[in-house]
Amino acid sequence: MTQVSESARPERLATARLVLRRIAPTDVDAMIALHADPDATRHRPEGMSPPEHSRQLFVSWLDHWVEFGYGYWAIELVGTGELAGFGGLQLAYGEDGAYLNVFYRLFPHFWGHGYAPEMVGAAVEWGRRTHPELPILIITPTTNARARRVAEKLGFRWIREAHFQGALSCFFQLPG
């Protein structure tokens, strides 16, 4: 298991337009709303989630923070503090071993502003600095052209196509 030192814990990161902050229990209602949105979950293999399933998933995100000292952030706009969605890196395990999984999901009215690549860029920079031994992957259903473009824009390379969480998915890995 990969742990980070206390000084490397990314409680809060900032980009030009975003604040990425550690999720808090008070964010659960926003996460439930996000996972109940049919547009936001269009490419999610399991689709929309009932509130209890979303609540359990959110608790797993909180637990990841406790166990590893990092995880998915709440993504807020710098100017307004408005919550745009959630995203970041979590430790995951695949057939090739441990890796950092890139995840993001934004409320649809925040799509098309470049927030996803901005957040992913900050997450990747943090991940490379603190966990250089771990590959960084984006795994997205083949139907999600926007996510594939984000991966390619940030220099991720397509490595394979395979089933993941019930959907045929593209696996992208960051070189180096």
Image (cartoon, rainbow, N blue to C red):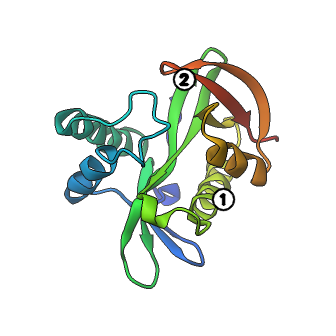
Q: What residue lies at 36% left-to-right and 44% top-to-bottom?
A: 38
Between 131 and 49, the residue placed more toward the observer is 49
Q: What residue lies at 69% left-to-right and 43% top-to-bottom?
A: 148
Q: Quadrant of residue 65?
A: top left
Which residue extends farthest left?
52
Secondary structure type for disc 2: strand
In the image, taking residue 175 as reference, residue 53 lies left or right, namely left
Instruction: Tell me if residue 89 comes above or below residue 80 in the rendering.
Output: above
Can you see residue 131?
A: no
Can you see residue 89?
A: yes
Q: What residue lies at 62% left-to-right and 49% top-to-bottom?
A: 127
Nearer to us of marks 2 and 1 is 1
Instruction: Tell me if residue 45 comes above or below residue 11 in the rendering.
Output: above
Horizontal and vertical percent position of residue 84? 41, 65
Horizontal and vertical percent position of residue 71? 44, 47
Q: Are the residues at dot 2 and dot 1 in contact (C-beta closer than 8 Å)? A: no
Horizontal and vertical percent position of residue 157? 80, 38
Kind of residue at disc 2: Tyr
Q: What residue lies at 45% left-to-right and 75% top-to-bottom?
A: 77
Q: Earlier in the sequence, mark 2 or mark 1?
A: 2
In the image, taking residue 174 as reference, residue 126 lies left or right, namely left
Between 116 and 42, the residue placed more toward the observer is 42
Q: Where is the C terminus found, in terms of image quarters?
A: top right
Between 47 and 137, the residue placed more toward the observer is 47
Horizontal and vertical percent position of residue 33? 26, 51
In the image, taking residue 85 as reference, residue 140 lies left or right, namely right
Counting other residues with Cα less than 10 Å from the Cα at mark 2, is it few (<14), some (14-19), or many (20 or more)?
Answer: few
Secondary structure type for disc 1: helix
Q: Which residue is mark 1?
A: 121
Q: Which residue is mark 2?
A: 93
Kind of residue at disc 1: Gly
